[in-house]
Amino acid sequence: MNNKFFPSNFLFIMIMITGTMLSLSSSHWLTMWVGLELNLMGFLPLMNIKGKMLEAEASMKYFIIQSMSSSVLIISSVMMYNLSLTWHSMFNNNMITLMMIMSLIMKLGGAPMHFWLPSITKQMSWSILFMMLTWQKIAPLFMTSMMNSNQNVIMVISVMSTIMGGIMAINQTNIQLIMTYSSVSHLGWMLSTISINSSLSLIYFINYVLISMPLMNMLSMSLGNHLFMLTRKNKSHQIITVSLMLSLGGLPPLLGFMSKLIILITLIQMKMIMLTLLLFMGTLISLYFYLNMSLMLMIKSYKTLNNKKPMKMYNLVIIFNLMSSLIIYPMIMMV
């Protein structure tokens, strides 16, 4: 598959989308599992889109990890069926629920099961990386939201993901690895409210996609994947890239801050003060490397003043990101 526009790629994308939709439209655990496997079979060929040896190695690692977590998921589903004689969400055994949660967290790449993610993502193209960090998380997140027991475990995992994602990105020089650990950190915020109010996690996920889509596209225009390349001449739009980075870090009054604010308000209303403080601490750690990348683009780059007009396809997303304090905050107050 050396050709980037190989005709069968469309087929693989459709298989991947069908698998995710099958998981989302079902309340039956066996059908959800089938959907996850379909999604995996569609995504694996797309990982080998350039036909390089490193991509083949990454796809094999991804296949092994996903197969392992799927095996644990189907075994725990069968055990649940033996106990309750139903394939639907009847969680009356904490051990089985814990097995299911851990298998889904491994699929999502959340801490402490996130160690497979960086070794795979640093060998990918930016488009496939974006799909892995966004689309591939939809079905497992939906399945996690159906868990109605062991909520304390999910809370602990969310805190670990936020803090570990921030700490492990600090000394990284590879931009793709920084975006990967950033995704682990954001996953913690999504998991924090997934069992309380899953619609808030959906809002946070949509905002994450809206910010990371133009940002990853602009970062892919730079000369290489290493951090010092941001100081060289590149085709990206510095001011807009900086605003998107700071938005991803959660700096007010940008869109990333607004999505975090909604979750913070909800957690404080639920009297979860310690969880709120720990999530906030993890975000402060991750804000360090976002500011570092922003400084590289703004101060160290000698092409800062030559700021081109943004691409038309992202104009609406960028305006929404910058003006979110005027659009979203009044909506939050009204609700």
Image (spheres, rainbow, N blue to C red):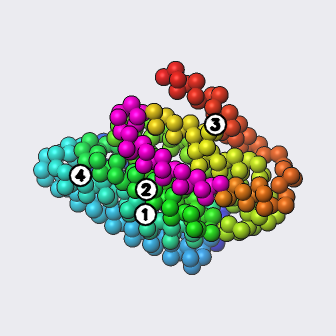
Residue found at x 67% / y 69%: 226
Residue 190, compared with residue 285, is above or below; it is above
Q: Can residue 290 be seen at all in this image of the molecule?
A: yes
Dot 1 amino acid type: His
Magenta extent: 266-291
Task: Say which residue appears at 29% left-offset and 51% top-offset.
Answer: 153
**Does dot 3 land on a helix, a strand or a loop?**
loop
- Kindly identify which residue carries mark 3: 253
- For image coordinates 52% across by 27% down, the residue present is 332
Give the spatial CA distance, label 2 vs label 4. Answer: 20 Å
Q: CA distance from mark 2 to mark 3?
A: 24 Å
Sequence-first tag of 2 and 4: 4
Of badges 4 and 1, nearer the viewer stands: 1
Q: Nearer the viewer, residue 174 or 299?
A: 299
Residue 142 visible in rendering: no
Q: Which residue is mark 2?
A: 161
Q: Label 1 belongs to which residue?
A: 114
Location of residue 28 by image quarter: top left
Tell me the distance, in whole angstroms, between the alpha carbons under discs 4 and 1: 20 Å
Magenta-drawn stretch, dominant element (helix, strand or loop):
helix
Secondary structure of the residue carrying numbered label 4? helix
Q: CA distance from mark 1 to mark 3?
A: 30 Å
Element type at mark 1? loop
Which residue, as the protein is rendered here, is positioned at the far top? 334
Sequence-first tag of 4 and 1: 4
Disc 2 + disc 1, Cβ < 8 Å: yes
Q: Is residue 195 left or right of residue 116?
A: left
Q: Farthest residue in the right direction? A: 306
Residue type at mark 4? Thr
